[in-house]
Amino acid sequence: MDLLVDSLLSALLLVASMDPEMVAIVAVSLKVSGISTVFASLMGVPFGFLVAFESFPGKRMLITCLNTLLALPTVVIGLFVYAFISRRGIFGPLDLLYTQKAMVIGQTILILPIIATFTIAAISKIDDRYRKTAMTLGANRVQTALVVFREARFGIVAAIIVAFGRVIAEVGISMMLGGNARGFTRTMTTAMALEYDKGQFTLAVALGIILMGLSFGINLLFHFFQGRTRV
């Protein structure tokens, strides 16, 4: 019990002092997770909107596959990407392994199904009368799609927030593809794992406090936008 209390107090002091190493680790986490979320959103939102808005053969099977990918373990994604970017892989000459770019690739793959699935759910909840009314008033296909997108915007933003919360807390992909290099690819979760292995809990607890604070803020945003979708 004393160890926990001492570690917590030391961690709070470390957070308050804005330790340079801790700040660098948090910065890497935010940078990699933020870029991954942007890339996944640019691909996932249009794809999810297209799947929800259009009718085509195999649509249900595609949605089922996307739902299945939501449970895809991070280790599987790490192994998959590693096979392509390692020295013996197809993209080996690009020297992507153990870089932030490799982490971004893996994390983008991880949250792409999340954003696409939540976007489909957000679009599907929109009353079909919006679409019919827009077409009755003379709107073309693109204008009708924009009307539906506007009504679903809060649900789509919530999807992006959930994806960011998922990716910033993952550890498998960051460890396997980033290598946990100090000052370069070390994220909050990989640093916490390393400090635990070393038996030094102060930095690990400090990063845990920051991560919990970020998670709390992300959940507040999610519930805010989720509430707006019900208005």
Image (cartoon, rainbow, N blue to C red):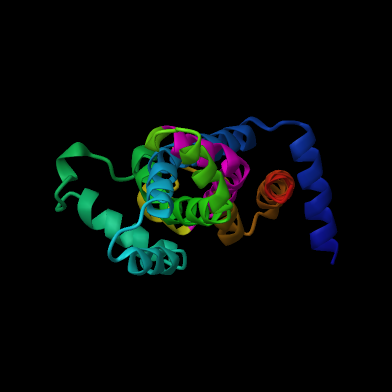
Asked if 147 appears above or below 223 in the picture, the reply is: above
Q: Is residue 143 left or right of residue 128?
A: left
Q: Look at the image and say whether residue 148 sits in the magenta stretch.
A: yes
Asked if 72 appears above or below 185 in the picture, the reply is: below
Is residue 179 at least partly visible in the picture?
Answer: no
Q: Look at the image and say whether residue 4 sits in the magenta stretch.
A: no
Pick whichever, 187 or 109, lies toward us: 109
Q: Position of residue 222 (x, y in %)?
A: 68, 48
Q: Is residue 194 left or right of residue 205?
A: left
Q: Is residue 196 left or right of residue 105?
A: right
Could you tell me what secondary structure mostly forms the magenta stretch?
Answer: helix
Q: Position of residue 50 (x, y in %)?
A: 38, 48
Stretch in magenta: 143-171
Pick whichever, 63 or 222, lies toward us: 63
Name the residue at 56% across, 33% down. Answer: 27
Location of residue 58 by image quarter: bottom left
Q: Position of residue 201 (x, y in %)?
A: 68, 55
Pick whichever, 142 or 31, lies toward us: 142
Pick whichever, 200 or 212, lies toward us: 212
